[in-house]
Amino acid sequence: MTGVISGGGQWAFVAAAYGLTVVLTGAVLWTSWRAMKKAEKRSDALRKDRK
Amino acid sequence: MHAYANPTRFLQIAKPLTPWLLGAGLLLVLGGAWAGLAMVPGDYKQGETARILYVHVPSAWLGMGGWTSLAIAGLIQLVWRHPLSGIAARAIAVPGMLFTALCLATGSIWGRPTWGTWWEWDGRMTSMLVLLFLYAGFIALTSGDDGQRQGGSLSRGAAIYALVGAINIPIINRSVVWWNSLHQGPSITLGGSSIDRALLWPLGLTVLGFSLLFGAIVLMRMRRIIADNRVAARLRRLADDEGI
């Protein structure tokens, strides 16, 4: 498949670029948020146990 | 700056700041993406594919900006042994790699309909790929090392690696000027922009929005490392108290 693509066919490439950005950024945001909440919960629980 | 070297003081700011960065970042990105997809006209030459600009440019900026921040954190760790600098460098690596990968992927998707090829081994794309490998190397170097067990600080080797890797940043920036490339030359410089204002304003929204999201991710990852450090320290104290 060679050559430039024009017209309506271009929207598929735009959708792919935005879709990939949403999926990957969302995945890193979600995993970072979950890992942070889990770690802080464990830290707080351990601190309360010590009191 | 040293006043915030204390993780407790840092958390007093980071905890309320994280949801604000996250919320404002999401709003700006959604607004910028909506404007870029639905409000602005297509480019007169490239047509609709020029809309990829609104996710490609922020990714490139954050991939390069991420490594610059990582190198500064490495320098601070080497010179001042700031307790949070190693934690910050570790927290930056994954989102930095994410946005570098997104820059390469969205650039490739943009290249296919525009240039007729997914990939070209020219200066810009190759130096950006080197940046992706640098991030992967840094993550491999700092995962499960002694520093992670000692409060998150970086080893001397990892800090020097971060500094040496920064040589690639000006190479990426100047690559389209130094070498012939399919990639266009710099469109936004200190002197102004060659992009028409009608197409430019959503880019400001997405660059700012993705930067805030990057900041939120870094804060979340720093908070996770600090919480893990506290758990490890408490478990050590418990073990000492019980004479294990």
Image (tube, helix red, strand yellow):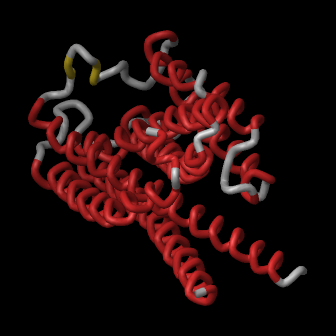
Is A27 in front, or is B10? B10
Left or right: B156 as drawn, with respect to B191: right
Residue farthest to the top? B178
Rendered residue at 32%/51% (across/down)? B212
- Residue B159 point in image, percent of width and height: 68, 35
**Above or below for B132 versus B185:** below
- Residue B23 point in image, percent of width and height: 26, 64
Rendered residue at 30%/40% (across/down)? B53
**Above or below for B142 versus A34:** above
Q: How many numbered badges does the structure rendering display?
A: 0
Left or right: A12 as drawn, with respect to B141: left
- Residue B95 point in image, percent of width and height: 51, 52
Residue B110 can be seen, yes or no: yes
**Above or below for A48 versus A10:** below
Is B46 in front, or is B227? B227
Quadrant position of residue A48: bottom right
Quadrant position of residue A26: bottom left
> Which image quarter is the C terminus of chain A in?
bottom right
Rendered residue at 53%/30% (across/down)? B125
Is B209 in front, or is B225? B225
- Residue B27 point in image, percent of width and height: 21, 61
Rendered residue at 19%/49% (across/down)? B36
Is B92 in front, or is B121? B92
Left or right: B192 as drawn, with respect to A5: left
Residue B129 can be seen, yes or no: no
**Above or below for B185 versus A1:** above
